[in-house]
Amino acid sequence: MAKKQFKTESKKLLDMMINSIYTHKEIFLRELISNASDAIDKLYFRSLTDPSVTLSKGDYEIRIIVDEAARTLEIRDNGCGMTKEELESNLGTIARSGSFDFKNEGGPKENADKIDIIGQFGVGFYSAFMVSDRIAVTSRAYGSDEAYRWQSEGVDGYSVEKAEKDGFGTSVVLKLRPDTDDERYSEFLDEYRIKGLVKKYSDYIRYPIRMEVTKSRRREGSPDDKPEYEEYKEDETLNRMIPIWKREKSEVTDEEYNNFYKEKFRDYDDPVRVIRQKTEGVSDYIALLFIPARAPYGYYGRDFEKGLQLYSSGVLIMDKCKELLPDYFSFVKGLVDSSDLSLNISREMLQHDRQLKMIAKALEKKISDELIKMQENDRDKYKEFFREFGTQIKYGVYSDFGAHKDVLKDLMIFRTSMGNEMTTLKEYVSRMKDGQTKIYFAVGDSREQAELLPQVEAVTAKGFEVLYLTEEVDEFALMMLNNYEGKEFLNVSSDELDIASDEEKESLKAENEAAKEMLDFMKEAIGDDISGVRFTNSLKDHPACLSSEGALSSTMERTLGKMPGQENAGIRAEKVLEINSAHPIAGKIRELYDSDKEKLKKYAKILYANARLISGLTITNPSEIGELVTSLMVGD
């Protein structure tokens, strides 16, 4: 029979689709199984209003048949089948979808809201040409005595002719391409590979997908000491059909959720939180999300790939859809199943899908709400979660110029000077003293180091609580927040620290004015590392400390200096050496200024080095400081 030609635009679309739209060749099996499921759906829905269709739902199946010798792979269904005209229309015109027409025009109107047809885009069938050089589709419509075969070898055209077929339904037979150095098409004849692909993409198709598989058993009568085995063929159902997320919530146990998570996402630990969301209306979808107990290997590395599995009516579209998760929730694992998303769609098109953006926004709020619930109702579990993923939350506050800070600010928890428990910003503010206008924090590599800062002792002595920031991102996150409920954040090492009474301030101002020449002399001795030296009355028992002028603190300087490309950028905080006016060291330096200015220079440098160490900074001239200490010890 003479070949019929695809239209010119259809040829171009077919060529583009085969070579461009689909990234992985393996998805052809997903497409053909989905089409088979559609065909069964159509007949099943027809049975709801047509008494001549006597099949029950349990009578339907999709069958996969492999013939290694002939290099053919067949996908067969007992669905509605197609007439000659439908073969011409659905397969002869690329991008025409019979499923779409059925749902929007030919389906049973009274059940239209229940129709969930997968393949509505109309190009998925042709993905089979990625792995085969010839496709034969033999179909017999339900209730008809005639069968027809559509056959094509690709863009050159197709033919439709009468054929023989037992029973209704459709059979798609692929003649696989020969193997090459770059491509091994024979893998799609391997039963284990096929089983894996069905499990990956089509595990939740609602009809059984069956295949004849080879198994082994002990031969009857074989001796116990040398047992013999024989191979035999057996039908095996490859898919589970009912996804856990489509079962009623009350019917699924915690153990089932945990086992599903560990199997699906290859984790050894149970998740700390299971989040399930079902939304109907503007956007219909079901989400099943998991908060892992541990950060996966390489989570904070550049190569970590975020994303949720994306399903369309139980069929996997994408293994990691990154558009569904913001970076600060990249630790979340799970899936989204939406009947609103087209199955046969490319990754590039998905990135701009309006429906995805709506789902992503709703998921962001749901995840945030569930984390707050865990924080309020199970603080120990939340602390474990935050230990693993808190850094990511804080980076989210700081990133994108603080665009997400309102979503994340209440998720952060910190160590504090008030006991061993971690606190939220909301809890800190609720405990603030009357008249307190600042949220005080101290920065260190550990709680212990931050706690030893001289300024912390002074602030806590006044009865104020201090947050301990121990990660490099912490201070940046708080500075990006700027304030919480109108209370500004203040580093206790800032020169803006103001906890003295008015009388103490006036006394200190007079003391600094009187000692201006001496303090300038000490600043000159230390050099350009500091912007000034002054007395303070806020140190209690410590001799000296460093404070920072301006927004950039010493710890922020250190962090920025470690960033790639910034090692020699000259980013510096304006540091001030503050000397405790009530400490014996104050009297000693006054005495030396009058009697031995050279020795005062040594004292100044040693005090500065000591203050740097207490602040967690390194000493740039350790040899010089060592010699100065030695010379003072021997009385030089």
Image (cartoon, helix red, strand yellow):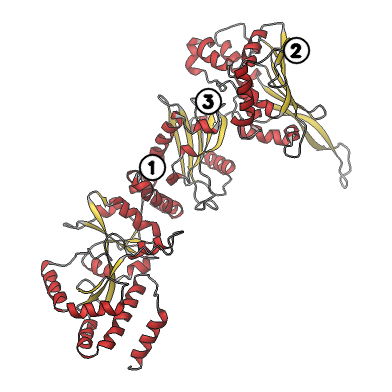
Question: Percent x, y for residue 204?
Answer: 59, 29
- Which residue does the image show at 26% across and 50% down from the upper left? 484
The first of marks 2 and 3 along the sequence is 2
Mark 3 belongs to which amino acid?
Answer: Ser
What numbered label is drawn on residue 340? Answer: none
Asked if residue 25 is positioned above or below residue 622 in the image, the reply reads above
Quarter holding residue 413: bottom left
Q: On the picture, is 546 further left or further right than 234?
A: left
Asked if residue 279 is positioned above or below residue 513 in the image, the reply reads above
What numbered label is drawn on residue 342? Answer: 3
Q: Which secondary structure, mark 3?
A: loop
Mark 2 and mark 3 residues within 8 Å of each other at the beta carbon: no
Question: Percent x, y for residue 187?
Answer: 73, 35
Question: Does any portion of residue 430 appear in the rendered image?
Answer: no
Q: Which secondary structure, mark 2?
A: loop
What numbered label is drawn on residue 166? Answer: 2
Question: Percent x, y for residue 159?
Answer: 72, 13
Counting other residues with Cα less than 10 Å from the Cα at mark 2, is it few (<14), some (14-19), or many (20 or more)? few
Front-most of 508 and 40? Answer: 508
Counting other residues with Cα less than 10 Å from the Cα at mark 3, is it few (<14), some (14-19), or many (20 or more)? some
Asked if residue 27 is positioned above or below residue 448 in the image, the reply reads above
Mark 1 belongs to which amino acid?
Answer: Ser
Question: Does any portion of residue 179 appear in the rendered image?
Answer: yes
Q: On the picture, is 219 further left or further right than 43?
A: right
Quarter holding residue 440: bottom left
Q: Which residue is mark 1?
A: 368
Mark 2 belongs to which amino acid?
Answer: Asp
The first of marks 1 and 2 along the sequence is 2
> Which image quadrant: the C terminus?
bottom left
- Which residue does the image show at 30% across and 50% down from the upper left? 481
Q: CA distance from mark 1 to mark 2?
A: 56 Å
